[in-house]
Image: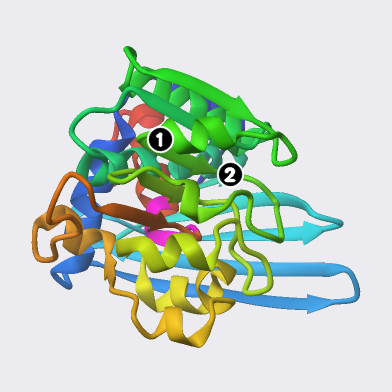
Amino acid sequence: MVHFSDDDVARALGVVDVTVALRDAFIELASAQAAQQARVRTDAGNVKLSTLGAVLPGQGVAGAKIYTTIDGQFNFVVVLFSARTGRPLATFDANEITRRRTAAVSLLAARHLAPPEVGRIVVFGKGVQGRAHADAFAAEYPGAELRVVGRNDDARSWVERAQVIVTATRAAAPLFDGNHVAAGALVVAVGSSRPDAREVDDALMSRAKCIVADWKEQTCREAGDLVLLAANVRERLRIVDLGDAISGTAQARESDRDIVVFKSVGVGLADVVVAGLAYRELTGCEP
């Protein structure tokens, strides 16, 4: 079994379209051909240990991501196994995997959920995930006007005119007034995976035609964007899984004026898929 660094992963994934494998994996999950484990968090003192994983026979891999959180800082490792033989294949420093898979899942969601014409994009967040999302969406929509703003910036004019709004911050409270979001917009909310923190408000969620979750089983429990909603808003929500939206089993939009929210907390399926891609590229071998 070998170990790969974040630099190795960055070199390997620079030549592949991660979203292709992710699309297949989410469809496999929706059709029960793949399975994943919900996140488990364990903590003592100021140290938190989290694990999440997935089994993907169609892609030949199984594995788990394990990471620590200390004083708000994360360190990630992925352990990858062959789904054919059960043999451990590799371990990975997974900060780069986490950065890339999060932006790639958001981009995959946008390909299926964004309105037909995207002329303006605003990204909230100037950290690692904000920059990763800005890079991914700029490449996907080269003709669009894109602005990156901090969570304390006055971005109302951008929120009012954007077709895609991305929130990738550590905010504990909503970043903008959901009444200002334009009809037809897609809001991609990826910053919060804690039940006590949220980036979007009740006004936005009450206007949304559909909430698309990376995985309802985990997202509805972890996302403060959903947990902290007023009861009368929450009970009216229509929430579907990303795999169902991609495969066409569930329809997120009925018209170009519908507002759609994609809420992601990060799932083990994405980590294992991306680790599998990196393994193939770095070794030239199938799992």
To which residue does mark 1 refer? 278
Q: Is residue 258 visible?
A: yes
Q: Is residue 63 visible?
A: no
Q: Tell me the distance, in whole angstroms, between the alpha carbons under discs 1 and 2.
A: 24 Å
- Packing grade of label 1 (10 A; few <14, some 14-19, many >=20) is many
Instruction: State which region is magenta.
Output: 266-270
To which residue does mark 2 refer? 168
Single out the residue that lies furthest toward the right: 45
In the displayed structure, 144 sits above or below 165; it is above
First in residue order: circle 1 vs circle 2: 2
Please report the residue visible at 19 percent of the width from the left and 67 percent of the height from the top. 30
Q: Position of residue 103 (x, y in %)?
A: 45, 38
- Tally of numbered discs: 2
Taking depth in this image into account, of 178 and 147 the one nearest to the observer is: 178
Q: Find residue 28 and name its label.
A: none
Q: Is residue 195 magenta?
A: no
Please report the residue visible at 61 percent of the width from the left and 34 percent of the height from the top. 155
Q: Is residue 269 magenta?
A: yes
Residue 108 picture quarter: top left
Mark 2: amino acid: Ala
SS under mark 1? helix
Taking depth in this image into account, of 242 and 66 the one nearest to the observer is: 242
The kind of secondary structure the magenta stretch mainly shows is helix
Q: Position of residue 219 (x, y in %)?
A: 45, 70
* Side of 226 where 245 appears, left or right: left
* Side of 198 where 242 appears, left or right: left
Mark 1: amino acid: Ala
